[in-house]
Amino acid sequence: MKKDTRGDVLLSRREVMIGAGLAAGAVSTLGIAGRALAAEDRAGQPQHWDMETDVLCVGSGAAACAAAVTAVAKKAEVIVVEKMPMAGGTTGKSGGVTWIPNNKYMLALGIEDTREDALRYMARYAYPNLYYAEGETLGLPRPLFELMEAFYDNGSKMVEWFEELDAVTFRQFRMWDVDTPPPDYGDHLPENKAFNARALEPAVGASSAGGGGSLAYQMETWLEKHGVPILLEHRAIGIIREGGRVVGLKVRNNEKTLNIRARKAVIFGSGGYAHNVELIQLHQPGLYGSCAAASSTGDFIPMAQEAGARMGDLSTAWRTPVVLEQALGNRAVPHGVFFAPGDSMINVNKHGVRVMNEKRNYNDRTQAHFVFDPVNAEYPNRFMFMVFDERSLDRYAGALPFPADKRDRAWLIEGKAPQDLAANIASRLDSLAASIGVFRLGEGFASNLETTIERYNGFAETGRDEDFQRGYHEYDKVWHKLFSPVSKNAQFPDNDKPNPTMYPIDRNGPLYAVILAPGALDTSGGPAINANAQVLAPSGEPIPGLYGAGNCIASPSGPAYLGAGGTIGLALTFGYLAALHATEQAR
């Protein structure tokens, strides 16, 4: 445990997970095929129980700990099992930001976030293909709409109750000063009436190495004070049922197998499957690396299937571009390219043309990698090339994927001019073919890149990106400032152009490129749940005794990353809802 100079408690979970040195192959084998087991042994005798409790929580991140805290506060006995040697999961590696609509901090500022407005924003952003403003459920199937209703109705209650319990304390999330709240990721959508105010962060430790470590630590400390066992290196390997009800888990600790009875409920908050290569190949359009905890191997999916669960959408993820060559070295990357830094910088596809606004959020920006070309039967954006000049490389040194020192250039590709750069990119792709398959630049890449740069430079001079509206909206400008910090050793001058996110690329000096690939913070697909976080059977009825929250279940916001902290806000709220419902059940 570390402390910063102000005494804020820190957990260096990120360093521990990275320092574990889990290679891609090792990570992909962490999951064990799950089973649903009857509460009788092979001889027909009653199941032997090694431990008993009311509520058994699987995982130790935001979802599982929120469920555990809530259950304890409702006077239930609780056990937490975590398969890794350290608690916290992906939450512990995160920034700990928590997106909650209509929270008390908004209300204190006089910001109104009505139920109708918030639901319209969430529905419009998550399901633009279904959204119908005049419909009773805004065009969504009722089960999806009810999940969003549950989030709005209960997220703020969860925050206030956790603070009353002294389990977690929050504050409004601010970026680098007290006057700059973060714009939501769909800040400019007309349905977003209360943007810039829904994101919270832990009141202790958030300004340090990782607010997620503080968030997880606060809940773990509270649980320990209330006598809750947190069993590390205990992996759930089978759901135990009695009749149609889930009554416990089979858990493995080293070579020992334990049967743990749950008199009221088993609540999974065990993370997604970002490090399970088999599931990725089955369900994801592309996911080359992830900064999720190494424990995110989708263990809940096969266990839930064996228990008769209906799967929700398995194809979603909290997406981010990653540096391809870094991810090929180890799928468990420390960071994604959450925001493309630099101003004299563009992203182009295999044809050397821009296909998006480079300054939009990581989740939405990654979707551009999956565009299909029906004429040539290929994905021309599968890999993109971040192209920049000496100015961005110098001025924003150290902002991923810019190296802190030009000599540290493992994934940096250089060329004197577009033609040189194209040849060197093509050579690099050829060298990676065994890992990525055949992906070749289009024949016109070099000439198109030159034209693309010339067009972009014209936009940079006028401040008007006529193709993709880069820098038009508050999100682009505010997050650009955060993720493009100027190096203290920068030699190039400030941006004096009308649009702070754009500056002309110098075509006379050397050009550089980095290959970007689709990755994820974690996946967000799995079993379907209802508004009580109960896992559903194919009939749509809940499976008694089985609950899920967080990244291990089908996301209540679908593919939409609603704003900073969108993942943790959902995880905390549905973990809370799971435990509220579970503790009301008879033993």
Image (tube, rainbow, N blue to C red):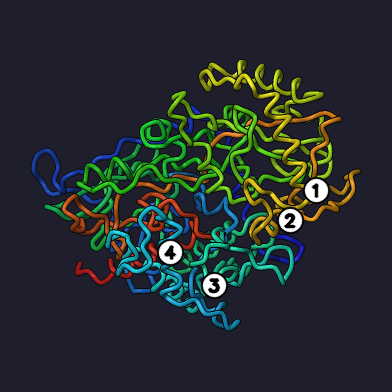
* As drawn, 91 above or below 104: above
Disc 1 marks which amino acid? Glu
Reading the chain from its start, which is encountered first: label 4 or label 2? 4
Q: Is mark 1 on a helix, strand or loop?
A: helix
Which of pointers 1 and 3 indicates the residue nearer the eye?
1
Please tell me how crowded label 3 is: few (under 14), some (14-19), or many (20+) other residues with Cα within 10 Å.
Answer: many
Q: Name the residue under label 2.
A: 481
Q: Residue 513 carries which label?
A: none
Give the labeled residue for mark 3: 194
Which element carries disc 4, helix, strand or loop?
helix
The x, y position of residue 459, in whole percent, is: 74, 46
The N terminus: image quadrant: bottom right
Q: How far apart are marks 4 and 3 (CA)?
A: 26 Å
Q: Distance between the residues labelled 1 and 2?
A: 19 Å
Quarter-of-image position of residue 211: bottom right
Q: Are marks 1 and 3 in contact (CB under 8 Å)?
A: no
- Visible in this render: residue 74? yes
**Label 4 amino acid?**
Ala
- The residue that disc 4 covers is 66
Q: Residue at x 37, y 36 (%)?
A: 283
Which residue is pictured at 88% across the width and 45% down the height? 490
Mark 4 and mark 1 lie on one chain; the one further toward the N terminus is 4
Along the polypeptide, which appears first: circle 1 or circle 3?
3
Q: Residue at x 38, y 60 (%)?
A: 131
In three-dimensional space, the C-alpha distance between marks 1 and 3, rounded to whole angstroms, equals 33 Å
What is the number of the mark on residue 461?
A: 1
Residue 262 % position (x, y): 26, 58
